[in-house]
Every structure is written in C-alpha cells, then in structure tokens.
Image (cartoon, helix red, strand yellow):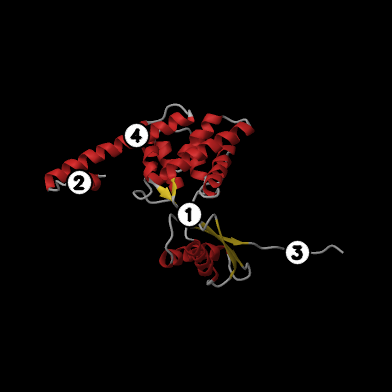
C-alpha cells in the first residue's frame, strides 16, 4: 500500500516514506478489525474477545494454496452450522468453532508449531470455551477427537478445502512431493509400505513386526522426520505415523 501511494504521489524522500508507512499501517489495522467484525456479523455468533476479532481479520491477508483463509473460515463455519443443525447440537457454537479453526495460520509464521495447536492456544488464552478450543486443536488430528463438534469442524474444513476450484497447486509439483515423501519413508529398513494422506500433511508407515520392535518404531519415526526435514520443501508440518502390527493366527479343525 505504501509503495503504491508513494509511486502515485511522486514525492519519495525519507520523511514522506515514514509518514506514508504509518498511515498505511493504520489503514491495514482498520481493515483487519472491520474484516473480523464483518465475519462475526455475517455468521451471527455473538461477541468475541477483541484480540480474536483482530486475528480473524488478519486471515483476510493469508492464503493457503490460493484459497483465501478468511473466506475459507467463514465457509467452514456455515458448513459447521448446517451439520450441527442436522445433528441437533448448538449451531452458534459450531459456527464459532468453524470460524476460529484456522486462526493459528494468522500467527504461525511467528510461533513455532502446528497451526491447529497454536490456534487452540490463542482461543484458550482469549476465553473461548473448552469445547471450541478442543475442536480447533483436533481438526487436523493433532489431538484425538473427543466430541461431535471436533468431528464436524474437521469434516467442514475438509469439504471447504476439497471442493472444486477451492485450492490450486501445480499438479506435477504436488505429485512429486507426495512421491518423494513416500520414497523417503520406504528407504528405511523394515518398512513394508508407506502412504501419504491428508494432501501430504501426514504419512503413515507400515513396518514389518519381525524386523522392527516397538522401541525401534519410535526411533524410526524420528529418523524419518529428520530426513524429511532435511530433503523436502513443504508448507506447514508433516505428521509421521509408524504402525507396527503383530498378528497371531491359528485354525480350529
């Protein structure tokens, strides 16, 4: 905004730059607040802590695979409300959880960790109900699901992100990233199969129980995570799940 104003005005010198930057900062902060308040009004979910309204408004300037995060959050909130009405649980609470589910993306570049966990911490800090905090934290399975609301938020998030035209990524780059992820996992001894799920946000690794012990599975998960961090470029974080299964089979004759 500052650059556009300076170029249009033509007067570019240190004092003028500082003045324009300060005014643009105020304008952006005003836009952020208005965007957050507009989302609350559109969804009809009542009052919210001013800090959370500001964070919701900041999502106006964040994109995920070319999908605007604020629009996605509002859409997710409406979907949550529709599902909640069918299941006869509080609609306003479901919409509230849907709107707030991605607030961690507004600050995830400043705070380390999954945007779901970071968002839950922000919601808890600013007085949101435990049910909503849990739904935010669990929507990418960073926490085990413990409520119907958490399932609803996760489902609505997936529907909004997966609908035709919602997100864009170069297909070849996406396919290669998933293939590389599965290839890294399969390169370790004892790995039987590996499957990238949730659009490459998680990889599930099946190991041979005869070759990998329970303790070895924990070490393997850590080793895979370190190799993925070293060799791959990817948005957010990738969850590594190593699965070791032992079966005992007998036949009654």
Circles 2 and 3: CB atoms closer than 8 Å? no
**Viewport quadrant of the N terminus:** top left
Circles 3 and 1: CB atoms closer than 8 Å? no
Q: Where is mark 2, residue-wise?
A: 6
Residue shown at the point (29%, 39%) measured from the top left: 28
Give coordinates of residue 214: x percent, y percent.
57, 63
Give coordinates of residue 153: x percent, y percent.
54, 41
Foreground residue, 29 or 170?
170
* Among numbered discs 2 and 3, the one appearing first in the sequence: 2
78 w.r.t. 168: above or below: above
* Among numbered discs 4 and 1, the one appearing first in the sequence: 4
Q: Nearer the viewer, mark 2 or mark 3?
A: 2
* Among numbered discs 3 and 1, the one appearing first in the sequence: 1
Q: Secondary structure at mark 3?
A: loop
Give coordinates of residue 71: x percent, y percent.
45, 41
Q: Nearer the viewer, mark 4 or mark 1?
A: 1
Residue shown at the point (38%, 35%) measured from the top left: 35
Q: Secondary structure at mark 4?
A: helix
183 w.r.t. 35: above or below: below
Q: Is residue 17 visible?
A: yes
* Disc 2 packing (10 Å; few <14; some 14–19; many ≥20): some
Q: CA distance from mark 1 to mark 2?
A: 33 Å
Q: Nearer the viewer, mark 1 or mark 2?
A: 2
* Among numbered discs 4 and 3, the one appearing first in the sequence: 4
Q: Secondary structure at mark 1?
A: loop
Q: Where is mark 3, residue-wise?
A: 249
């Amino acid at each position: 905004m500052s650059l556009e104003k300076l170029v249009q005005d033509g007067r570019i010198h240190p004092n003028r730059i500082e003045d324009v930057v300060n005014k643009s900062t105020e304008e952006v902060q005003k836009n952020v607040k208005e965007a957050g308040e507009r989302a609350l009004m559109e969804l009809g979910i009542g009052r919210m802590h001013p800090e959370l309204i500001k964070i919701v408004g900041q999502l106006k300037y964040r994109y995920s695979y070319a999908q605007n995060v604020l629009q996605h959050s509002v859409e997710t909130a409406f979907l949550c409300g529709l599902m909640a009405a069918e299941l006869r649980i509080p609609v306003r609470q479901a919409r509230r959880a849907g709107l707030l589910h991605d607030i961690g993306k507004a600050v995830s570049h400043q705070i380390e960790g999954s945007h779901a966990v970071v968002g839950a911490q922000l919601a808890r800090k600013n007085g949101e109900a435990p049910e909503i905090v849990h739904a935010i934290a669990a929507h990418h399975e960073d926490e085990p699901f413990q409520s119907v609301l958490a399932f609803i938020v996760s489902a609505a998030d997936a529907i909004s992100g997966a609908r035709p035209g919602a997100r864009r990524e170069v297909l070849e780059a996406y396919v290669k990233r998933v293939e590389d992820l599965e290839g890294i996992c399969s390169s370790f001894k004892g790995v039987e199969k590996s499957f990238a799920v949730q659009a490459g946000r998680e990889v599930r690794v099946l190991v041979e129980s005869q070759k990998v012990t329970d303790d070895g599975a924990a070490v393997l998960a850590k080793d895979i995570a370190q190799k993925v961090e070293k060799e791959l470029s990817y948005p957010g974080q990738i969850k590594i799940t190593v699965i070791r299964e032992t079966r005992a089979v007998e036949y009654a004759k």
